[in-house]
Image (cartoon, rainbow, N blue to C red):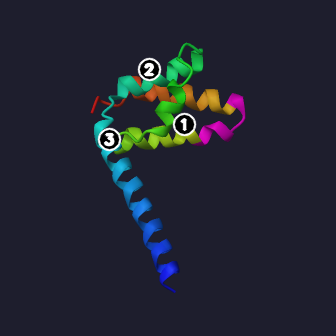
Amino acid sequence: MTYIAVVVLVILAIVLFFRVLTGISKRLNRRTSAEVADRIERHMQGTEGPWDWDDFTSVPIADDHLDAIRLRCLELEHVLPEERVAELERTVERLRNNAPDR
């Protein structure tokens, strides 16, 4: 019984540790609408570095609206290429034209 309790406590500690790291990461990752649009455009053009897209989709953004866009970009990895490109283009256009920098 105590062995199970120790295992559960260790798992909870690990989960808490990663939640804290995610929160810190999110607060430090302050991006503007223009920066997010640039990241997406570079990805579509293929002019980014080898890990840029992974970095973009893996690290939470402080602004909740921009973070939702980041998460949607991640979901689009599983969509047909034509649909993916079309949605990414619309997203970049919205970021450039409608959304104020935050």
| Residue located farthest toward the bottom when viewing the structure as drawn | 1
Which secondary structure lies at badge 1?
helix
Q: Secondary structure at mark 2?
A: helix
Please report whichever mark, 2 or 1, sits nearer to the chain's N-terminal start.
2
Mark 1 or mark 3, whichever is nearer to me: 3
Q: Which mark is residue 56?
A: none
10 is higher (above) or lower (below) than 72: below
**Which residues fall within the magenta stretch?**
75-82
Q: In terms of sequence position, does the residue under pointer 2 or pointer 3 come before the other?
A: 2
Picture residue at 34% right of the left edge, 43% below the top:
26
In the image, residue 97 above or below residue 19: above
Judge by depth and name the residue closer to the eye, 35 or 15.
15
| Amino acid of disc 3 | Ala
Q: Nearer the viewer, residue 9 or 52?
A: 9
Image quarter where the C terminus lies is top left
Q: Which mark is residue 62?
A: 3
Kindly identify which residue carries mark 2. 38
Q: Nearer the viewer, residue 25 or 80?
A: 25
Q: CA separation, marks 1 and 3?
A: 16 Å
Q: Which secondary structure is most common in the magenta stretch? A: helix
Occupied quadrant, residue 38: top left
Residue drawn at 56 percent across, 29 percent down: 88
Residue at numbered disc 1? 73
Task: Identify the secondary structure beneath mark 3.
Answer: loop
